[in-house]
Amino acid sequence: MFYEEILKGGLLITLMRAVHAEQLEQLQRKVFPALADDELLHAEQYRKHLEIFPEGQFVALNGELVVGATTTMRYHFNKRQPEQHTFKQVMGEGWLTTHEPDGKWLYGVDVSVHPDYRKKGIAKSLYRARQYTCRLLKLKGQVTVGMLNGYEKFKDQMDVEAYFEKVKRGELFDRTVSVQQKIGFEIIGLMKEYLHDPTCGNAGAVIALDAKKEV
Ligand SMILES: CC(C)(COP(=O)(O)OP(=O)(O)OC[C@H]1O[C@@H](n2cnc3c(N)ncnc32)[C@H](O)[C@@H]1OP(=O)(O)O)[C@@H](O)C(=O)NCCC(=O)NCCS
């Protein structure tokens, strides 16, 4: 498979390669400073992902520099009844051994964009690359659990359920889940105790994007 999109300013969205692995580990630390180390992806794990499911791994490059990335796998998903899981469980503790080769959905393990490169359309184009993979493999669409990253500011005012409902109704703008909504994702439900990150109340929003939707 070949995939390339060139963004304004020359940023390139393309398939991940093993040579990017060390930089990807550094990017994880930069983008998710509050995540526990065993919930971050490491160079060795990225190299494994490329053996397991190369069509699902993309990077954003500024020349040789990795400034954004996404990790995905195939997954069985019931939109009406999403199964409870933790981030660590679903991604095989970072190794993607949970990839289901006949899964009809593309599960987004993460999207990360370096802070200096945000609001340039990188996330949107990484989701677009994922749509390409969905269509190529005839999948139903993408599913992921978006971290409720804006909850920290409101944690003394409301519990995470109330925060989630307000984000869902568009009454509060969450810097991750509302961005995903803007890109076209539908909010399906709340997943509590998804990971260990107090900034998002350890919770995430289950969201899905139909493969037919244009991003
Ligand atoms: C969330 C994240 C991936 C967005 O990346 P990005 O490359 O800046 O997003 P894009 O530039 O593609 O923006 C997509 C849309 O959201 C908007 N947007 C992005 N960040 C925004 C923010 N903080 N506030 C308001 N709007 C925002 C953009 O303006 C754009 O809207 P448009 O299509 O109408 O122009 C990035 O902020 C990030 O890496 N955050 C930390 C890690 C994370 O939370 N990842 C998701 C894990 S579930």
Image (cartoon, rainbow, N blue to C red):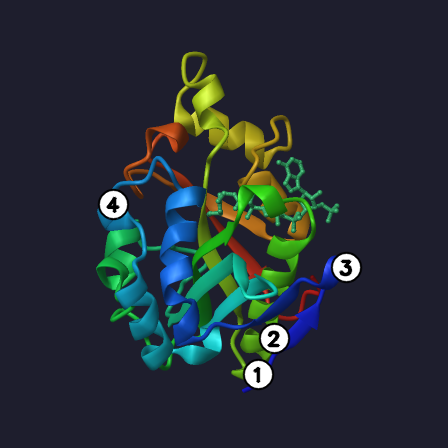
Residue drawn at point x = 67 percent, y = 46 percent:
182
The answer for how far apart the CA atoms under marks 4 and 3 are is 34 Å
| Residue 106 coordinates in the image, percent (x, y) | 46, 68
As shown in the figure, which amino acid type bears the numbered disc 2? Tyr
| Residue 74 coordinates in the image, percent (x, y) | 40, 72
Quadrant for the C terminus in the image: bottom right
Mark 1–mark 4 CB contact (< 8 Å): no
Residue 133 located left or right of residue 201: right
| Residue 210 coordinates in the image, percent (x, y) | 60, 65
Mark 2–mark 4 CB contact (< 8 Å): no
Q: Quadrant of ligand 1?
A: top right
Residue drawn at point x = 27 percent, y = 67 percent:
44
Residue drawn at point x = 53 percent, y = 47 percent:
114
Residue 85 visible in the current orientation: no
**Residue 168, located in which quarter of the rendered image?**
top right
> Residue at label 2?
132
> Residue at label 4?
37
Closer to the camera in the image, 176 or 14: 14
The answer for how far apart the CA atoms under marks 1 and 4 are is 34 Å
Task: Give the vertical position of 168 relative to 48 (above or below).
Answer: above
As shown in the figure, which amino acid type bears the numbered disc 4? Asp
Q: Nearer the viewer, mark 1 or mark 4?
A: 4
Indicate which disc, 1 or 4, sits on the residue closer to the N terminus: 4
Closer to the camera in the image, 12 or 127: 12
Q: Nearer the viewer, mark 2 or mark 4?
A: 4
As shown in the figure, which amino acid type bears the numbered disc 1? Leu
Considering the numbered disc 4 on the image, is that residue within a helix, a strand or a loop?
helix
> Residue at label 1?
136
Quadrant for the N terminus in the image: bottom right
| Residue 97 coordinates in the image, percent (x, y) | 25, 71
The answer for how far apart the CA atoms under marks 2 and 4 are is 31 Å
Instruction: Return the mark for residue 8.
Output: 3
